Image: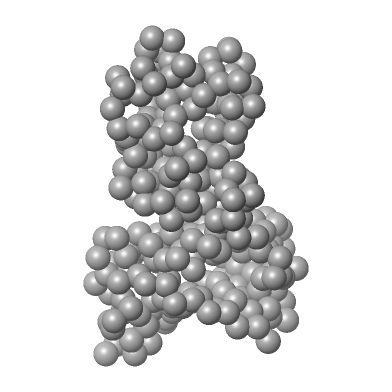
Amino acid sequence: MSMKISTRQVDGVTIVDCSGRITLGEGSVTLRDTVGQLLGKNQKKILLNLGDVNYIDSSGIGELVSAFTTVRKQGGELKLLNLTKKVHDLLQITKLYTVFDVKDDEAAAVKAFA
Amino acid sequence: MTEQRLSYTLDSTLETVDSAEQTASRMAVELGFDEEEVMRIAMAVREAAVNAVLHGNAYDPDKKVGLEFERTGRDLVITIRDQGKGLDLNKLPDPLAPENLLKTSGRGIFLIRSFMDEVQIRPTQTGTEIKLIKHVHGPSAGGKEASREHED
């Protein structure tokens, strides 16, 4: 299953609903393009909903890191929402869990943006 | 105990990466690994295949990836060979070091070592060979890391 992305706005925050796999190739490119387009529209409060992402490889992890740093460099914020156990475990193993701001409640996550 | 061996010679493409992962997943299921271990084995193979296709062979259509699955007495052994320039293990950065945490690459070998019981990486005459070993039965079958490296 390839990656699918849709976006919606809630109280000034862009929620990016991701599903499928974030892996080398199509999945990583789709995420990169989406974040780039949002920044191009000055939408810099981004909540990545990974609740339906069932698989992510090291390239996908790299893409999450890239999105995080790119948004931050432009003065924005990127948070992660609803990690599956697999993605949670991967971020723990790679010590990235504490780098990202990870949320498990959408409403609370939206309120957490400055 | 049945011994089984499957060998493939594949192009340096993303399809090879997906195919290697799927074959590893199928074989791990057949060997009775639980869902968590199947995912770990499949991901380790995927990462090794990515290294072979992307970093080793650099998508060169003239270079091939060798993929071999072998069930020995108590191990699942997966060997992946590329025809690239070789891998300098001493130059691999530690992806857990604070200065590397926000790097966008460099986690593949680390994940492979985390997910397999043994990992052997060695240069060959034509590139690099990585051997991934998972014990089918035994005390370390739960995914505990016990990786080691071999160089000629």
Left or right of B74? Residue A76 is right
Q: Compared with residue A46, is residue B47 higher up or lower down, i.e. above or below?
A: below
Task: Place residue A93 in its image quadrant.
Answer: bottom left
Q: Compared with residue A32, is residue B43 higher up or lower down, i.e. above or below?
A: below
x, y percentage for residue A18? Answer: 40, 31
Q: Is residue B152 visible?
A: yes
Q: Quarter of the image containing the N terminus of chain B?
A: bottom left
x, y percentage for residue B7? Answer: 49, 76
Q: Quarter of the image containing the C terminus of chain B?
A: bottom right
x, y percentage for residue A36? Answer: 59, 24
Numbered circles on residues, count: 0
Q: Compared with residue B12, is residue A37 higher up or lower down, i.e. above or below?
A: above
Q: Is residue A19 visible?
A: no
Instruction: Please report the residue visible at 59 percent of the width from the left and 37 percent of the height from the top.
Output: A66
Task: Place residue B80 in its image quadrant.
Answer: bottom right
Of B96 and B76, nearer the camera is B96
x, y percentage for residue A31? Answer: 51, 32
Task: Place residue A75 in its image quadrant.
Answer: top right
Instruction: Please report the residue visible at 49 percent of the width from the left and 65 percent of the height from the top.
Output: B112
Instruction: Please report the residue visible at 28 percent of the width from the left and 74 percent of the height from the top.
Output: B31
